[in-house]
Each structure stands twice: as C-alpha cells, then as structure tokens.
Image: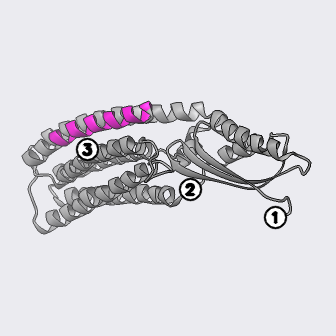
Amino acid sequence: MSEGTTRAVFAAFLGNLAIAITKAVAAAMTGSGALLAETAHSIADSLNQIFLYVGLRRSARPATERHPLGHGKEGYFWALVVALFLFFGGGIFSIYQAYDRLAHPHAVEQAAVGFIVLGLSTVFEMFSLSVAVRELRHAAREDDVPVRRFFGQLQDPALRTVIYEDSAAIAGLATATIGLALTVATGDHRFDALASAVIGIVLIYVAYQLAWGARGLIVGQAPPERVREALEATIGSEPYIDKILELVAVQMGTDQLLVMARVSVHDEIPAGDVERLMVRLRDRLRREHPEVTDSFIELAPADA
C-alpha cells in the first residue's frame, strides 16, 4: 500500500466522521433539508473511506495459486462499490430530500447553528482535501509529470476517490450555505429544497466519474504512454533484440503492471544465448520498472 494514499484515506475518514456527527445535530436543530442532505453525504463518505481502506489492504495481498496474477484489481472493485454507495446513499437521498421538502415544507429554525456547522465543516473538508492534494503533488513530482495531467492518468483509485469526494463535499457545503442563507433572508423554504437537489446532482456526477474510472481499470487499462515508452526503451536496448513486434502492458493494480511482449532476435544468436537473454530481460524489467509484477516474452520471426 502507498503510505501517502493510506494517510489521505485516514484523514478523510476522521474528517468526514466528525463532520457527519455535527451536521446531524445541526440538521435536527434547524430542520434544514440541505443540512440533512449534507449529513447523508458525510455518512456516505465516512463509510466509503472504510471501503477504500479494505480495498487497499486486499489489493496488496500477494499472488496465490487461485489468483496467480495477484489481487491488485480488487482495489478497483472497491472503488466501484464506493461510487455506487455515493450514488444511492448520497445523491438519490439528497434528491428525495429535496422532493420531500417541496411536498412537505419545514420551517428552518436556529439558522445560526447551521451556519456555524457549515463553516466548521468547510474547514475540516479543506484540511482533508489539502492532505490528498499534497500526496497527489508529491506523486506527480516523483514521476516528473504536471499535476493536472498526472491526475487525469491517476491509477490509484483510493487517492482519486478521496480528491473527488472532498471536492464534492466543499461544493455541497457552499451550496447548502447559499440555500440556507436565501431561505433565512426570504422565508421561502424552496431555496433550501433546491440546495438539497443541487447537492444530489453533484454527488451523482461524482459517482458517475468514479464508476467510469473504475470501469476502465477493471476491464484492463493500459498505463500512460510515458510508461509504455520506457518499457519499449528497456526491451529495445538489449543488443540481441532485432525488433519489438508487439508490446502489451495492462494495469493490474495501483503500481502493478503485467507486460507481454513479442520480439524477434538476430538469426545468428545461439540458442543458449537466447535463453539467457529472456532471463536477463525479465530481470531488467522488474529491476528498472518496479511496477512490473510479471512479464512474458515471446520470440517470433521478424516478418510475423
């Protein structure tokens, strides 16, 4: 497991748990639908951090006879579970809450409590997001890739989920604050209901993004082009290799790659040297690219 990712998940769990408790108290005191929707959001986020931690632990297990390629993809499965839970436990509930507030108006009371809780929650969420963004920047700096491009290619479902969830939480808190302020200023409960609906839409969008990213990784996604080019450079640098006919690299988990290559060698190489070449090449791939957990090299004629 990545220590930075584990730290980000743990910080998000503690922050969301504290926020969920304070929001629940504030929602009960104020009767605000937007605050109730935010409470459901924070509860969903807290449980999601547990799912992510389970995924991190289980994906780090070594290969077994039943799972010869390891358990790396299990992290992607739990990321999909997180997306589904966020969709139903956060998004759908928030939209239902908006409908309920429109059909059965509730007066908003003790609004000051709501504003205090929303302000404190924003501080907690900003702290949690800052931890995740710091880990993202650190990882991008290690790979010498711009942060924005690195995030678009991020293969770590746990860190990606934490960043998405915390960003959605801050957007939801801003929406709830605006809805509560308009409700207090105008006395119209529909602003509070509208804020709850907007929060639901934001959560559904985030759930879709997380599910779509997990889908690509579960199906079997290639690593970034820079990784593929580095693998080609390592294989092609062997003096006995004539040509790389085909190279397939598949993401098997966070920092776990399966590499399959079909190469041709010079005709005058003795059979014994070819065997040693295959062993040396596999050793080099693992040594120079620690993310390569296994590799399969096949020989074929150059005109294959």
The crowd level at tag 3 (other Cα within 10 Å; few <14, some 14-19, many 20+) is many
Q: In terms of depth relative to the viewer, which is nearer, 77 or 303?
A: 303
Magenta stretch? 3-22
Does residue 293 appear left or right of residue 48 in this picture? right
Amino acid type, residue under disc 3 in the picture: Ser
Q: In terms of depth relative to the viewer, which is nearer, 89 or 238?
A: 238
Image coords of residue 260 (percent x, y): 66, 53
Outermost residue to the right: 268
The crowd level at tag 1 (other Cα within 10 Å; few <14, some 14-19, many 20+) is few
Q: Mark 2 points at which residue?
A: 221
Q: Can residue 233 be seen in this view?
A: no
Q: Mark 1 points at which residue?
A: 304
Q: Residue at x 21, y 52 (%)?
A: 40
Q: Callout 2: helix, strand or loop?
A: loop
Q: In this view, does 144 lie above or below 182?
A: above
Q: Residue at x 13, y 47 (%)?
A: 27
- Mark 2 vs mark 3, CA separation in Å: 28 Å
Q: Of marks 2 and 1, which one's residue comes earlier in the chain? A: 2
Circle on res. 46: 3
Q: Which of marks 2 and 3 is in front?
A: 2
Outermost residue to the front: 272
